[in-house]
Image (cartoon, rainbow, N blue to C red):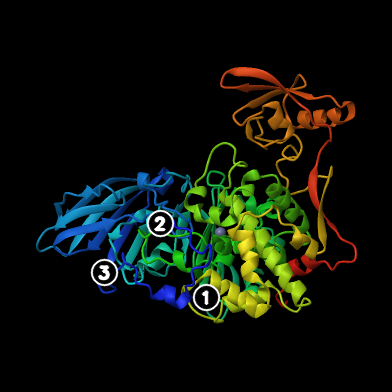
Amino acid sequence: MRIVFGVVGLGLCAAHAEAIAEPNANAVPYATQADPETLVLDASTAGRGFAISTLHIPARPGPFTFVYPEWIPGEHGPTGPLAAIARIEVTANGEPLAWHRDASDMYAFHVRVPQGASAIQVRFTALLNAPDPMSTHSLAVINWNRMLFYQSDIDYRHYYVKASIILPQGWGYGTALAAADRVDQRVDFTEVPLERLVDSPLDCGRYYKEILLWQNGDAHHWLDMFADEPQDLDVPSNLLGAYKRMTPEALALFGSRHWHDFHSLLVLSNKIGFTGLEHEESSLSGAPAGFMSDPQSQQLSGDTLTHEFSHAWNGKYRRPWDLTTRNYQIPQATDLLWVYEGLSQYLGDLLSFRTGIRRPGGYPELLAQLYSQMATEPGRSSQAMVDIDVAAPYLYEARGEYPSLRLTAEDLQTEGELLWLDVDTIIRTETGDRKSLDTFLHLFTEPRLTGPITSAYTREDIERLLQQVVPYDWHGFFQQHVYEIAARPPTGEIARAGWRLVYSARPNEFSDDGAQWLTYGFNIDKDGSVSDVRENSPAWRAGMAPGMKIETVDGEEYSPSVLEYRMEQAQKIRQPTKFVVSQDGWAETLEVSYFDGPRYPHLERIEGRPDLLAKIMAPHAKP
Ligand SMILES: [Zn+2]
């Protein structure tokens, strides 16, 4: 299902890729603009964790197959939550219709449509909080792909759906979909191709605020916020000012726009927490309750909205050719995520600093943290970056112990960021700072102004455009860093940017989980539960493992401050620290020999070299 494309380049140009007929998207769509599928979502019970979907699906007499979306764009995997749908009932002409699930494709459902019927009706219950939380007492996130079935094998650009939602009493909503009508709590949207519907999720809730961030003629950028508590919607004015610079900075970065009305949708809820999914004219983000009022939270995670926003250009408009499928049952190949996700990880950070959402000047500290993370994960010594990309459909779902021993989707994003910083500094150095990654992005996202459309690219397209920016062995560069096992972390780019990586006892504000990882070599939760142990670290050598809980440190009950104090003591007296740990009902004492005190990563300027990071992070939009 997932094939390693492009290891030596596949020689496909974008036009050719577009021209390949999609074998599983050739069925004649019965749902047309004149006779669309209709979806009425009764979400009046959203606060109780479920909604009821009633679908009218145009069909023809005889065997008919309807399907539940499986491969979800942006989620990069077969993540359609089959286990979250219940009580499926099918009727035709008011009579019950027997259905059966396909024995090998569990997302496909077969019926025999009786003579005289031109549609079937399907009604089912969607559980909103499986597998991940999507609703609370006061708000809900509606992803339409979870709420519908559609005719199998159609091309989603030519299959129309008209959606309606019934909201709980007193709730408001936000979405990029255009509303045709609203009566009380029922909102009817205009019919759109299935691709557009699924690409336009909806947030709704009791406490909400819509803020206009930017306007130019009839183009707008909105911030739609929904919160569990009304006070979480109060955004300090200087922070709001920074968010209002998102579009001007993005326009300076890309030189183009492929949306008319963009909605940055944001739910503020501790139950839902950090989440993000990109779309062409909206983005769907989640953050803990106090996110928009807490400056420290903004400093740590200020790319939450800017990362998804950058995907409107990189990922949604420009899309890897093998991620450009025509319906949700066709498997997606993810080998080019080093562009789709890696580049957006870098651009999300650029935008967060250029807008001032994050404190200007903070990027060197963030980079130091990323480098130290990458330097202490052994997975990369045996796997090429492209292998993380190819396996992404499963790595994004990875849970469990020893995350540092295996590569995860987080590594894909982080290493991708360092890769594109590398590209940026090479362009700046090779052109005497006349050009930058911005120059490439202007070419990459041409033409300047369109509506929401998709344009496919290959690895060769990327290398050709970079060659246009500045002659360089770009093929060899990506071959070395992406397609072959490379030393980690690469540090050429920080030296080129005028900085070097150093360690000291002074805390790094982005090392929010303390110094234990780089010192003893374990990660712990607040209660002392060990979640990961770094290979060959002092804790590893002492026999510590995930699943253990630290009870005492040198005889004293564990707390973060006790641990910190004992680390300082060990440095003075140079004696092993004694940890009493419990695991599965057993307790034991482990002696960890570490005597060098706290250790945090930082970047330090190299004298005499120009500071490229300052230039990269400076605002680019004209005031
Ligand atoms: Zn992303």
Q: Is 513 positioned to the left or the right of 189 in the image?
A: right
Residue 71, label in figure: 2
Dot 2 amino acid type: Trp
Task: Report the mark closest to the observer, 1 or 3.
Answer: 3
Task: Report the mark closest to the observer, 2 or 3.
Answer: 2
**355 above or below 442?**
above
The residue lying toward the viewer, choosing from 115 and 347, is 347
The quarter of the image holding the N terminus is bottom left
* Whether residue 364 is visible: yes
Q: Residues within 10 Å of mark 1 (few under 14, many from 20)?
A: many
Dot 3 amino acid type: Pro
Dot 1 amino acid type: His
Q: Quadrant of ligand 1?
A: bottom right
**520 above or below 111?**
above
* Residue corresponding to mark 3: 29
The residue lying toward the viewer, choosing from 231 and 144, is 144
* Whether residue 295 is visible: no
First in sequence: mark 1 vs mark 3? 3
**Numbered marks: total:** 3
Q: CA distance from mark 1 to mark 3?
A: 27 Å
